């Protein structure tokens, strides 16, 4: 992980050599981030030394992420999307809490420095975390196995041991997942999707008994990590994290590997799903004998998400490229799910 040095946010800072809070000369505010107000707030909190510059690195319907610099240090600010959003879907304190809890564990996460829940500062709650150098190279067998090790390490952490014993409701977790995605499907039906109701019926009639609950990431894949020099440096995007059945994480990861088009920025050569599942079983000590059901649930979840995007596209409610083809992913996902359950 990168470290800007002694003046890194989160350390005691000396006087800022006469510089005042504000915006670096020539710097423009990126969408959703008032640099002047942010600088004033973070200077008062003792986290920055002077004027700021920033650039947005991710945006859209997910949480917005910015790289922010004060001349000495580089760090990351994360806030909810612009416009009206459900607070429960973009809870800054939730992301901040789980990453803070995972410091000094085998799971690599950025260091967290500051949480601000006062929406008056920049228009929404936000938090500040470490800037980590890295990217998402194409998947390869060695990297895929390393990701499995990271996932097994996450699931091996006793939630109570890191202060996350009340982070979710593991009882009935799988039943709630099945019913949740059925409600989502019913809210976005615009065409006949062969087999999707049968997949739901099979899932709801054969819910496995969950093993020991664990901290669940909720969307674990290469695209939600940072990799440098062949090593996973940080796991990001914890907005879906909770306590629940860890095999939901494994199944979604396996499915992303088989359906590279669902994570096309990271397409590459992934080992067979059964090889990675066996690696996870050995690393975690968990029973994966019913992993097919979990893969079926992952198929149902991603099919419903894709169908919702297709519905919004047909209503003219999406902006950007690639939406026209998303609906084509639904049928193969449903077919794969029916094969598994």
Image: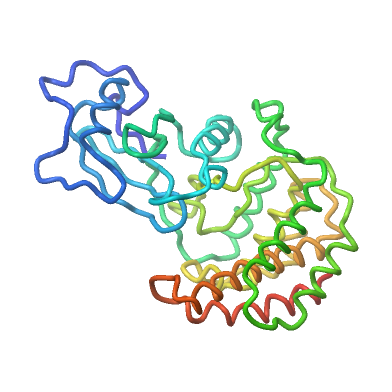
The spot of residue 98 in percent (x, y) is: 57, 35
Quadrant housing the N terminus: top left
Q: Is residue 341 above or below residue 9?
A: below
Which quadrant of the structure image shows residue 24?
top left
Which quadrant of the structure image shows residue 155?
top right
Query: What residue do we see at 55% from left, 76% from top?
Result: 310
The spot of residue 206 in percent (x, y) is: 90, 62
Q: How is the image coloured?
A: rainbow
Q: Which of 193 and 232 is in front in this view?
A: 193
Quadrant housing the C terminus: bottom right
The spot of residue 64 in percent (x, y) is: 40, 49
Query: What residue do we see at 10% from left, 20% from top?
Result: 18
Q: In this view, does 17 lie above or below 189?
A: above
Compared across the picture, whether 298 is left or right of 83 comes to: right
Q: Nearer the viewer, residue 147 or 203?
A: 203
User: Is residue 235 among what the camera can see?
Assistant: no
Query: What residue do we see at 79% from left, 52% from top?
Result: 174
The spot of residue 16 in percent (x, y) is: 17, 21
Q: Which of 289 and 170 is in front in this view?
A: 170
Query: What residue do we see at 66% from left, 30% from top?
Result: 164
Compared across the picture, whether 189 is left or right of 338 comes to: left
User: Is residue 144 among what the camera can see?
Assistant: yes
**Total label count?**
0
């Amino acid at each position: 992980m990168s470290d800007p040095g002694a003046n890194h946010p989160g350390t005691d800072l000396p006087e800022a050599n006469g510089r005042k809070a504000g915006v670096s000369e020539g710097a423009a505010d990126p969408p959703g981030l008032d640099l002047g107000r942010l600088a004033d707030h973070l200077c008062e909190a003792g986290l920055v030394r002077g004027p700021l510059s920033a650039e947005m690195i991710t945006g859209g319907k997910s949480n917005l992420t910015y790289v922010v610099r004060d001349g000495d240090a580089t760090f990351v600010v994360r806030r909810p999307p612009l416009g009206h959003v459900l607070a429960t879907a973009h809870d800054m304190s939730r992301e901040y809490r789980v990453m803070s809890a995972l410091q000094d564990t085998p799971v690599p996460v950025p260091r967290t420095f500051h949480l601000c829940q006062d929406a008056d500062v920049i228009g929404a709650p936000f938090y500040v975390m470490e800037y980590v150098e890295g990217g998402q190279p194409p998947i390869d067998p060695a990297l895929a196995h390393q990701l499995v090790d990271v996932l097994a390490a996450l699931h091996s952490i006793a939630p109570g041991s890191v202060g996350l014993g009340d982070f979710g409701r593991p009882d009935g977790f799988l039943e709630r997942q099945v019913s949740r995605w059925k409600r989502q499907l019913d809210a976005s039906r615009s065409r006949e999707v062969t087999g999707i109701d049968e997949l739901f019926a099979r899932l709801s009639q054969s819910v496995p008994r969950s093993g020991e609950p664990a901290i669940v990431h909720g969307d674990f894949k290469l695209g939600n990590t940072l990799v440098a020099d062949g090593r996973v440096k940080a796991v990001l995007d914890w907005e879906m994290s909770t306590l629940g059945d860890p095999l939901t994480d494994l199944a979604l990861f396996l499915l992303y590997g088989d359906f590279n088009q669902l994570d096309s920025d990271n397409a590459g050569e992934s080992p067979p799903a059964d090889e990675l599942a066996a690696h996870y079983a050995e690393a975690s000590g968990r029973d994966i004998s019913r992993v097919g059901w979990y893969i079926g649930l992952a198929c149902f979840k991603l099919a419903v998400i894709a169908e919702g995007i297709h519905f919004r596209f047909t209503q003219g409610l999406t902006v950007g490229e690639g939406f026209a083809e998303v609906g084509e992913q639904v049928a193969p996902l449903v077919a794969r799910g029916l094969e598994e359950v």
